[in-house]
Each structure stands twice: as structure tokens, then as C-alpha cells.
């Protein structure tokens, strides 16, 4: 066999074999399917280009290709019977774990976000969720619809203030790419700009069906998963 033919075979094999990130995302779907069959609620879902973290039940978690120290910290929280509420990725390899009412563990998140979280913790406020933009912006939702943010898209900031003024309940926010964002409110309402069309179509269908949209996570390449109701889910990795 000619050297050129061997090279062609090697290239075809490389194209057919899934990337490490894709393989882990398929593993995530398998884990979500198992949780669904067992009736265990999914509380938080985060994915990046390499792996994923699922927080489920009171303080259970599944983490694949996530930072080793993050996995260890969540394992400690699990053994201490703390309530693990959210795991989120931050730019530059950072991450954040929220637990109990306002506890948090972080690595390499924006300094301003870290200081504000510490302030809210000292004040006894409830930290509901934290989101990061790829460029280093952040958003903290706290107490009864309180908002603190910096460096997020202008459209997102404007819409969040409108929802807050109208006393809608902000359930979560996801940022994607340079200017994409998705805001969840009132169980299944959402507002978005510059998100992938397939994701918008899936969310629109769930909204029209009256499903409760619980979690949404999107990887840098546009692959996404949405969790609805107790632990139903829909995904698109194309």
C-alpha cells in the first residue's frame, strides 16, 4: 500500500473519531438520561469545549473533564451534606461553586465578582445564580430579584432592568460568544439576542408547551442542552 493511501486512511479515521469534547458531551447525555429515568432533579448544568458538570438532587454531582480541584471541593461539600446549588465556568479556566444560602468556592473568577460575592456573603444575602461572559463580565442574581453586573452586553443589562422593574422572577442568564445572551424568567419565559437559531427554536417550543425551563448550557462551539420540568432535557450537538 502506498504511503499516500495510508495517509488518507489515517485522515479519514481522525475525521470519523469524535473529539474529546464531543465524546464527553455524549457522555453527559447518557448521564442526563439516567437521572431522568431515576426521577432525580437536575439543579445545575454547565458545559465547556472539553467536559461538563451536572449538579443533581440535594448535593450530588457528576463531573467529567472538569478541574480536579473543583471536583475535590464538590466532593467535600457532598460529604459535609452541604447543598450544592450551582457550578459555572468562568473565562480563563476559572470556575465557581455555589452552595447553601450564599457560600461559594472559586478559582480565577474576575476580581470584582469575587469581592461582590464576598460582600453579599458577609451581609447574609441569598446568592441565587452567577453567570460569566467569555470576555470577563459577570452577573449576580441575589435575594428577591436583585441584580449586580459589570461588563455584560448592553441589551442584556437593559432587559434585566425592565424585568426587574416589572417584578418578573429572573431564573437565570447565559452568555455566549461576543454578544449573545439568554435570560430566563417566570418559569418558562425567555429573552435572547444572538443565540443559535436551533436553541431559540427549542426554547420557543418548550415555552409554547408550557414547560418549565430549568437549565440551559451552551459550549463555545454552539452545542447546547436545555433541561426542563423536573429533569426532561433536549440537546443539539450538530
Image (cartoon, rainbow, N blue to C red):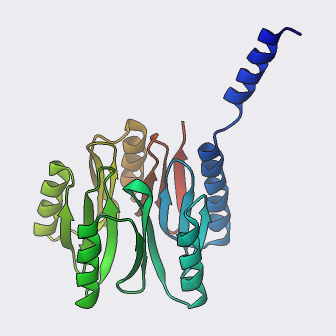
Identify which residue is drawn at 16% across, 57% down.
157
- Of the 4 image quadrants, the one containing the N terminus is top right
Q: Is residue 157 above or below residue 229?
A: above
Identify which residue is drawn at 41% across, 72% down.
106
Identify which residue is drawn at 34% across, 60% down.
188
Q: Is residue 238 above or below residue 168?
A: above
Identify which residue is drawn at 27% across, 61% down.
138
| Of 6 and 176, the residue lying toward us | 6
- The image position of residue 94, as x and y in percent, is 42, 62
- The image position of residue 152, as x and y in percent, is 21, 54
- The image position of residue 204, as x and y in percent, is 36, 47
Direction from residue 208 to residue 221 in the image, left or right: right
- The image position of residue 23, as x and y in percent, is 66, 46
- Of the 4 image quadrants, the one containing the C terminus is top right
Is residue 124 something one can see in this rendering?
no
Q: What is the quadrant of residue 91 in the picture?
A: bottom left
All told, the count of numbered labels is: 0
Q: What is the quadrant of residue 142 in the picture?
A: bottom left
Direction from residue 197 to residue 221 in the image, left or right: right
| Of 36 and 47, the residue lying toward us | 47
Is residue 81 something one can see in this rendering?
yes
Amino acid at each position: 500500500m502506498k504511503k499516500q493511501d495510508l495517509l488518507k486512511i489515517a485522515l479519514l479515521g481522525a475525521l470519523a473519531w469524535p473529539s474529546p469534547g464531543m465524546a464527553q458531551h455524549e457522555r453527559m447525555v447518557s448521564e442526563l438520561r439516567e437521572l431522568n429515568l431515576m426521577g432525580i432533579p437536575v439543579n445545575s448544568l454547565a458545559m465547556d469545549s472539553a467536559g461538563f458538570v451536572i449538579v443533581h438532587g440535594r448535593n450530588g454531582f457528576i463531573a467529567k473533564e472538569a478541574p480536579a480541584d473543583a471536583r475535590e471541593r464538590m466532593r467535600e461539600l457532598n460529604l459535609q451534606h452541604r447543598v450544592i446549588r450551582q457550578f459555572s465556568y468562568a473565562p480563563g479556566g476559572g470556575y465557581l461553586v455555589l452552595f447553601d444560602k450564599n457560600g461559594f468556592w472559586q478559582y480565577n473568577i474576575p476580581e470584582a465578582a469575587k469581592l461582590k460575592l464576598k460582600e453579599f456573603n458577609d451581609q447574609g444575602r441569598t446568592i441565587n445564580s452567577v453567570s460569566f461572559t467569555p470576555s470577563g463580565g459577570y452577573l449576580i442574581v441575589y435575594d428577591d430579584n436583585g441584580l449586580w453586573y459589570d461588563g455584560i452586553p448592553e441589551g442584556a443589562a437593559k432587559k434585566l432592568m425592565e424585568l426587574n422593574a416589572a417584578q418578573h422572577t429572573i431564573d437565570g442568564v447565559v452568555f455566549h460568544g461576543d454578544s449573545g445572551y439568554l435570560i430566563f424568567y417566570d418559569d418558562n419565559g425567555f429573552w435572547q439576542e444572538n443565540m443559535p437559531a436551533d436553541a431559540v427554536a427549542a426554547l420557543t417550543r418548550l415555552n409554547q408547551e408550557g414547560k418549565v425551563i430549568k437549565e440551559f448550557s451552551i459550549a463555545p462551539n454552539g452545542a447546547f442542552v436545555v433541561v426542563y420540568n423536573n429533569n426532561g432535557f433536549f440537546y443539539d450537538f450538530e
